[in-house]
Image: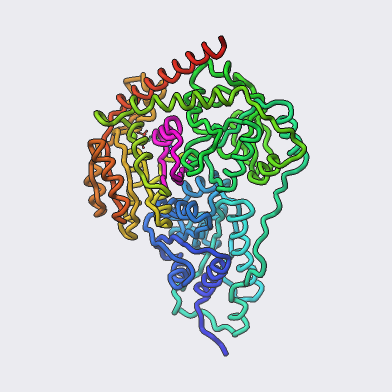
Amino acid sequence: MLIKINRNCFWANIFFDQLAECGVKYACISPGSRSTPLTYALSQNKKIKSYVIVDERTSGFFALGVAKKTNSPVIVVTTSGTAAAELYPAVIEAYQNRVPLIICTADRPSRLRNSGANQTINQDHLYNNHTRFFYDTGLPKLDLKKIRQLKEAAINAFDICSKQYIGPVQINIPFEKPLEPNSFTDEIEETILLESLPDELTTDYKQPKISTEQREIKLVADLLRKSSNGLITIGPGNFSDSFFDNLENFSLKYSLPVFSDASNGLRFKTKPLSNLIANYDALLRSESFPKLFSPKFVLHYGRTLTSPKLDVFYSVVRPKGIIINRFADVHDPTRKFKVLKANEELFLEYLSNSADVKQNDFSPHLKALKFLDYEIDKLKPEIFSISKKINETGLLLNIIDSIQPNSNLMIGNSIPIRDLDFFSSAVHKNINVFQNRGASGIDGITSTALGICSQSRNPTYLVTGDLSFYYDINSLLIAKQYNIPLITVLINNNGGAIFKFLPIAEYKNVFDKYFLTSTNLSFKKLTEAFEIDYKELKSQSDILNHIKVSSVRRKPAVFEIKTNANYSLSLRKKYWKKSNKLIENFLRNYEA
Ligand SMILES: Cc1ncc(C[n+]2csc(CCOP(=O)(O)OP(=O)(O)O)c2C)c(N)n1
Ligand SMILES: [Mg+2]
């Protein structure tokens, strides 16, 4: 029996059915004509939930958020032309932060490139250096071999982006008109129909064994044997609970302090990490600190830490540095660290259990570091109090204190992520922190937070700056359309106040116009234009009440808090001065 089909739609169905069979559950689709077969196929797919998002840039970042929260690949569909290019920022972030995205760019037939054909660009390797895999399916063909190749491409894309390399992949899919399902182009035999069914994945893909090689173990074991004077640093990253469990065992066994960036969530785990030094940045800001602690070696996990002071510290103490991660990614701008390709968890577990390594049962420094960490914590409530006057750091600390356990927190770039890293203490209520530190853009922060929130039953909070919020304002349409209950805390200091930390702030003739770039926008009007609840919060009690109440409303809300950047900066400086003094005083007695 012959069956009438439109070959483009048939092709798109095969591709997405195969991805659904692999386990893909979500897609983000932006409107367009050339992508009609892709859009139509997804609209009919029962296993893949689709979000329809007009603006491709926000779509890419929303997908990034969904992929981050679910730890699994998300499909993004665009039409041809600049629409596909709009995804580039999200693709870069996904590449550098290892988040799985399957970018499907619809295209015109390749013969139309450079011909003046409408909405036609060169989409071949469009995101050139920022994808883990590129495949052009070619125009749909109905022979068995081509269909098999298409399914293989889907399986390959899935495996590469979610298991082998983790990151974005691009599948370019050209179509010739007609594009609609009932515009029949072919009549096919049943054999082809059978071949088009998705291949069952008989065995689950096995992660290639990333062994902790003996040679590598030996290197670290030697370091541990020679000296107990070491340090563990944990940068931003997506770490499992078992990684943290192994870290606890390992750091306890060898009495090693742990400096952890706040954006990996380690500071906010329910189970405290015994050797965590949350105030590592404050310690590093003391020039005398190397007199107290001068580690001979550093074991580093995750991306580069937020604190700029770590590199300065290393240039003084010159430790032997080792980075451990499964992809051998380099996260060391100084390029002085050696990179070991090893599974992070297994590596720690192996070292903790290794009979080969003698246990160090003393550390001359750990006690002192813990004491200082504790004392520095005590400076914060008074300096950053917001009971009389709001300041940015105090605001963030209050939010951390008042959000519910098990909440998600997306932390915007610029000052919010620095305030979180430099000033937040350990709080044990399991806050899951998310960041876009892959490339640290301010472009897709709200969209990413919405993607995270869309996949969680627990409250999701976003803390973001005013320029970042403005930049991604289009994302509010997603919040409205899908009623995503993101609670946005918009810290409005009217411009890019981060630049006030820099020497350029002294150049009064250029600073305000070219760097601070105040927008003077009414965020109330902008937010309400999207029919999203808005409220300006002015006092501590206002802030605490609304943060608590908003989490049960299950509706998106934007809370704007206007802050004075200069006042906020003066308090940070006051804190650093006091913590510095505390460290100096301690050292005086310590040495005596
Ligand atoms: C896409 C992008 N453009 C420009 C920058 C450079 N940049 C870093 S921070 C910043 C200002 C952010 O301002 P705001 O969101 O208000 O945060 P604040 O500095 O006030 O905390 C800019 C423009 C960037 N990181 N990403
Ligand atoms: Mg700002």
Q: Position of residue 43 (x, y in %)?
A: 43, 70
Q: Residue at x 46, y 36 (%)?
A: 426
Q: Relative to 146, is 122 on the left or the right?
A: left
Ligand 2 position by quadrant = top left
Q: Relative to 561, is 308 on the left or the right?
A: right
466 up-or-down from 45: above or below: above
223 up-or-down from 413: above or below: above
Q: Quadrant of the N terminus?
A: bottom right
Q: Position of residue 130 (x, y in %)?
A: 56, 47
Q: Nearer the viewer, residue 204 or 54?
A: 204
Magenta span contains residue 420: yes
Residue 29 figure quarter: bottom left
Q: Residue at x 47, y 48 (%)?
A: 90
Asked whether residue 136 appears in the rendered view, the answer is: yes
Q: Nearer the viewer, residue 553 or 370?
A: 370
Residue 547 figure quarter: top left
143 up-or-down from 57: above or below: below
Q: Position of residue 579 (x, y in %)?
A: 43, 20
- Give the residues in magenta: 408-437
- Looking at the picture, the colour scheme in use is rainbow
